[in-house]
Image: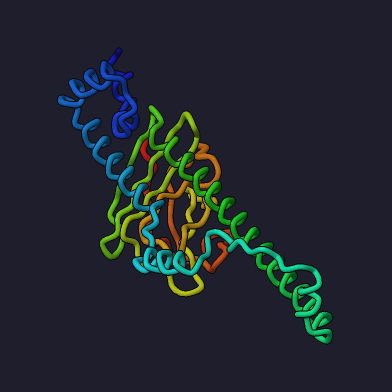
């Protein structure tokens, strides 16, 4: 394996995606290559931030709530022997049958509506999970690409930004760590810098201060990227001064 090939293995090494032989060869190479050592460090930090960005910690009260509800749920319906037809007819007040039937119909309708609502909620949750998984896979593909290159910079208020570019995939990922929450009704918008012309590359989640985002659109020869604060929903072009400007890694 040539030295040029070894230079391209930083992303795969950071994600533990190399064979034993490749890993040994790369480690021997990295011992004398400061650029590869630094890039592995940045990619390893990026992978850690990505895990934090997609993880969700359940609320502390969730376990207690589930255990409490379990005690109120009957697992099996009680087995009873139905009385004779004559006894059932005698025991039922004549004036109650119509209202009882109406109540049963209303209850069934209400329960049916609840079931439909729960099904819709579950379907929405599944779709959101699938979209999140697809985004995570896309981000991981860029981070693990053999030709992944990174560049990091300090941002305002102690935040840090890292951009990872894969020329073979023609895609880029922006990782933000410790960014301040945008003002109410605002969102961070990403941009590709095409020789001074800013091209929208998607929005960040306004509720997260640490996030890994697959930038929308192809890199397509862009020389840099930027982040601005825009109205919710984004803008066709920047409307505020950038909070971050970074050159893309070569």
Residue at 57% in and 51% down: 126
Between 244 and 18, the one lying in front of the other is 18
Residue at 47% in and 54% down: 190
Left or right, residue 93 beside residue 65: right
Left or right, residue 14 beside residue 238: left
Looking at the rendered image, the quarter that the C terminus falls into is top left
| Above-or-below relation of 231 to 103 | above
Residue 146 occupies which quadrant of the picture? top left
Q: Residue placed farthest to the left in the image?
A: 31
Residue at 29% in and 21% down: 6
Counting the numbered discs, the total is 0
Left or right, residue 209 beside residue 215: left
Looking at the rendered image, the quarter that the N terminus falls into is top left
Between 101 and 239, the one lying in front of the other is 101
Q: Position of residue 21 (x, y in %)?
A: 26, 16
| Above-or-below relation of 163 to 83 | above
Residue at 52% in and 43% down: 134
| Above-or-below relation of 103 to 245 | below
Residue 98 occupies which quadrant of the picture? bottom right
Q: Position of residue 113 (x, y in %)?
A: 70, 68
């Amino acid at each position: 394996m040539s030295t040029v090939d070894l230079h391209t293995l930083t992303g795969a090494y950071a994600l533990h995606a190399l064979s034993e032989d490749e890993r040994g060869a790369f480690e021997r190479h990295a011992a004398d290559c400061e650029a590869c050592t630094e890039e592995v460090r940045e990619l390893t930090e990026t992978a850690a931030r990505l895990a934090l960005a997609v993880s969700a910690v359940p609320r502390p009260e969730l376990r207690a709530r589930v255990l409490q509800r379990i005690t109120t749920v009957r697992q099996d319906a009680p087995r009873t022997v139905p009385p004779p037809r004559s006894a059932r007819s005698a025991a039922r007040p004549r004036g109650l049958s119509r209202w009882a039937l109406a109540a049963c119909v209303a209850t069934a309708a209400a329960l049916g509506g609840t079931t439909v609502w729960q099904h819709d909620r579950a379907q929405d949750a599944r779709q959101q999970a699938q979209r999140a998984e697809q985004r995570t896979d896309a981000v991981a593909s860029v981070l693990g690409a053999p030709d992944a290159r990174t560049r990091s910079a300090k941002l305002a208020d102690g935040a840090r930004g890292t951009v990872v570019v894969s020329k073979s995939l023609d895609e880029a990922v922006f990782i933000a760590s410790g960014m301040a929450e945008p003002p109410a009704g605002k969102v961070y918008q990403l941009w590709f810098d095409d020789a001074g012309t800013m091209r929208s590359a998607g929005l960040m989640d306004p509720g997260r201060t640490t996030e890994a985002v697959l930038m929308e659109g192809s890199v397509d020869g862009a020389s840099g990227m930027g982040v601005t604060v825009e109205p919710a929903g984004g803008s066709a072009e920047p409307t505020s001064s950038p909070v971050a400007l970074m050159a893309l890694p070569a």
